[in-house]
Amino acid sequence: MSKKVFIRTFGCQMNLRDSEVVAGLLEKSGYNLTDNSEKAEIVIFNTCSVRQHAEDKVWSEIGRFAKAKSKPIIGLIGCMAQNYKAGVFSRAPAVDFAVGPADIDKIPAILKSLLAQKSALKVKKIWETEGSLRPEEIYHTGFHLDKSHAYVVISEGCVNFCSYCVVPYTRGPLRHRKPEDILREIKDGVKKGITKVTLLGQNVNAYDYEGFNFVSLLNLVNLVDGLKEFSFITSHPKDTTIELFQAMAGLDKLKKYLHLPVQSGSDRILKLMNRGYTAKYYLDLARNYRKIVKGGELTTDIIVGFPGETQKDFQDTYDLVKKVKFEFGFIFKYSPRPNTAALKYEDDVPRAEKERRHQLILDLQKKISKKYAKNKA
């Protein structure tokens, strides 16, 4: 009888796509996917390390399954596995295997080995975190949770090294997929009923395969027969150009939506974050976007309470939000992450002050978002 597998995903859209990839690989290997975690013989957590809160939830969930009457095989995959490596097993002894983002193609073989060990009443922990390049074929299993929408990875990893961000350490350097492989995946999806696509990358608009840039890729995707709409996330301001805005305005299938994380409105904090632009640069981008992409939606990410953030720094961020008037914003409180450059800075903004600043920006953004919603009604 085929074993039942339950996959729980934490974090970003890249993780959602990775879970689909794993699900597709496991289905091809004869496993059955289930939404009922209580009946699963194998439980896999696809994890995020961007914020401490996300990690805490995973450790808690692992503890719950470890106490089950009939403990399933437990796997930890994704960014936490890459961060902790073999240390996963000392932190959570109930975990049977840990696999980093670049090694997910190995999961079917790992499970085969673990199940064989289990039948022999001996289980040896397995971890795979040393991979550097995913096999292209893992993206072509045809598995999508949504039968009309598909996430399509165009690049993996990141080389920006923002001082607060763990991604370059967990997902490795920037690698771009071949445009023909990306188009093949999209066209195969369209044949199976996919009508909408979201192009994914940790820094999606940095795409450049041997001189073939992001705007060139957008033009090709727009030509795919049967595709009705596509979009992309997440973009970095330093790689955002007027040429991109012109493409967004001119391509009929490309959604007029741009997620452009600003993170802070203070030049001093932006420099400490190693973001590579100033507040004025960002404001100019936002103004040009509104001017060129008529009716285009603009959303962002903001971190409050970064080490050394003064009241003035925070006020600069607050003022930027008022000026740009984002349709929506994801507002986060800074938390130190392993391996990141920001660890050398003292986390000196008190928790209560982080909470206060978080709430102020949140309340401001809610008012702005409410006005947009009212105007659309």
Image (cartoon, helix red, strand yellow):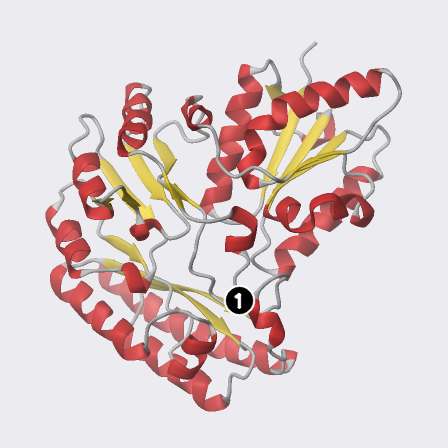
Residue denoted by label 1: 164
Q: Amino acid at mark 1?
A: Tyr
* Nearest the eye: 149 or 113: 113
Q: Quadrant of the C terminus?
A: bottom left
* Nearest the eye: 116 or 66: 116
Give residue 305's position: percent from left, percent from top: 54, 77
Give residue 319's position: percent from left, percent from top: 35, 83
Residue drawn at x 21%, y 52% as measured from the top left: 256
Q: Is residue 234 above or below residue 198?
A: below
Residue 62 found in image quarter: top right
Q: Is residue 34 visible?
A: no
User: Can you name the residue that lies furthest to the front here?
Assistant: 210
* Nearest the eye: 19 or 160: 160
Q: Residues within 10 Å of mark 1 (few under 14, many from 20)?
A: many
Q: Is residue 227 visible?
A: yes
Q: Is residue 206 above or below residue 292?
A: above
Give residue 11's position: percent from left, percent from top: 54, 49
Residue 289 found in image quarter: bottom left
Q: Secondary structure at mark 1?
A: loop
249 sits to left or right of 65: left
Residue drawn at x 23%, y 68% as measured from the top left: 285
Residue drawn at x 56%, y 68% as measured from the top left: 341
* Nearest the eye: 207 or 6: 207
